[in-house]
Amino acid sequence: MKKIVVTGAGGFIGHHLVTELKQQGHWVRGVDVKAPEFCATAADEFLLLDLRRWENCLHATRGVEEVYALAADMGGMGFISAHHAQILHNNALINLHTLDAARENGVGRYLYTSSACVYPEFLQTMTDVVPLKEDDAYPAQPQDAYGWEKLITERLCLHYREDYGMETRIVRFHNIFGPLGTWEGGREKAPAAMCRKVALAKLTGKTEIEIWGDGEQTRSFCYIDDCVTGLMRLMASDYAQPLNLGQDRMVTINQLADMVAKIAGARITKTHIAGPQGVRGRNSDNSRLRQVLGWEPMISLEDGLARTYAWIEQQVAVKRQPTA
Ligand code: NAD
């Protein structure tokens, strides 16, 4: 049994990670500015702390062996493309302070959650994009401030290992989705937004759903259970360079909408509107993931979407009920 901290434990991935770490018998402290929205935490201790502040980070990382650093001011494309200053400022403070506080407290292992958003725009201009290998991150040209901040913190983690001997691990997520994630309000990501739109179409009979751009932009999507498994495997590994964690099956956003509609048994008509689309195409090259972890995500997109859709349809239905 280890003593472990998960920052961002009130968020989507952090909440699922805490649940799994508890199931494996560890002692877990969750830290976030908010409690999980949809379900009580399984953490032994949950601290409500703003990790932009150094003294809060010292408190958060005290007396533990491992830190999973997931706290971030983030959201889907709509949010990321419209809040550059806020994202760079807040996330830089969170990451500078959390990493250094962990060093000060003698934490043995520190896993930082980076993103596929670090990859250069110039490699992602086509829908049939070549899958991105870890080394493709340089020369750097991330699309948004979110990606630049992730890249800088990756480097900080590498240097903390070299200069201070702290074992740092770096994961680059490719579009993680699943139940208990944000599904409305502006920070939701494409799979959750699509499930919400399709659920609304099904429940109201209004079949039209809006899609940002022509819907031909491509992505790969990874289900949350695979993400949590990958995170724990990477933390236990001796691999200290950045590692992709995602699926390598690419679909268009139009295909994603059709898949969700099929799962829902709903008829939809797609209306394409102007909106932030991010890069034109993105996929994960999982060669190194397979080599390093001897494993890769295995839950199919259809299976993951079915589980996610069921949960979001229920959320939408509850919200539509008139309050007594
Ligand atoms: P999330 O937004 O659900 O969780 C992030 C959590 O961080 C939130 O609960 C938020 O309240 C918390 N937080 C924000 N500011 C804070 C602060 N000042 N102090 C303490 N907590 C703070 O996001 P998620 O999808 O669970 O993502 C987890 C991590 O993975 C993030 O670092 C994110 O950038 C990264 N990531 C996620 C994806 C994805 O597809 N979900 C993709 C790439 C990278």
Image (cartoon, rainbow, N blue to C red):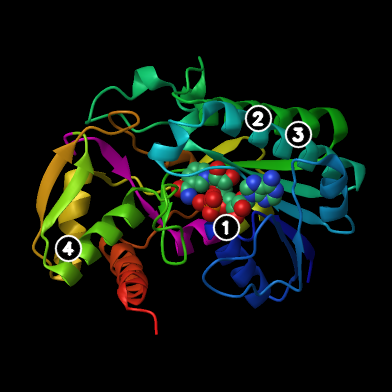
Secondary structure beneath dot 2 equals helix
Report if the beta carbon of the residue with label 3 is closer than 8 angstroms to ligand 1.
no
What residue is shown with label 4? 201
Please check the rendered image and state whether residue 226 is part of the magenta-colored stretch, yes or no.
yes
Residue 293 visible to the viewer: no
**Residue at image coords 39%, 58%:** 183
Q: Are marks 3 and 1 in contact (CB under 8 Å)?
A: no
The quarter of the picture where residue 149 lies is top right
Secondary structure beneath dot 3 equals helix
The label number, if any, that marks residue 96 in the structure image: 3
Question: Which of marks 2 and 3 precedes in the sequence?
Answer: 2
Q: Magenta residues, as a range?
A: 214-230
Secondary structure beneath dot 4 equals helix
Report if the beta carbon of the residue with label 4 is closer than 8 angstroms to ligand 1.
no
**Residue at image coords 73%, 34%:** 93
Report if the beta carbon of the residue with label 1 is closer than 8 angstroms to ligand 1.
yes
* CA–CA distance in space, label 4 to label 2: 38 Å
Q: Are marks 4 and 1 in contact (CB under 8 Å)?
A: no
- Circle 1 packing at 10 Å, graded few (<14), some (14-19), many (20+), is many
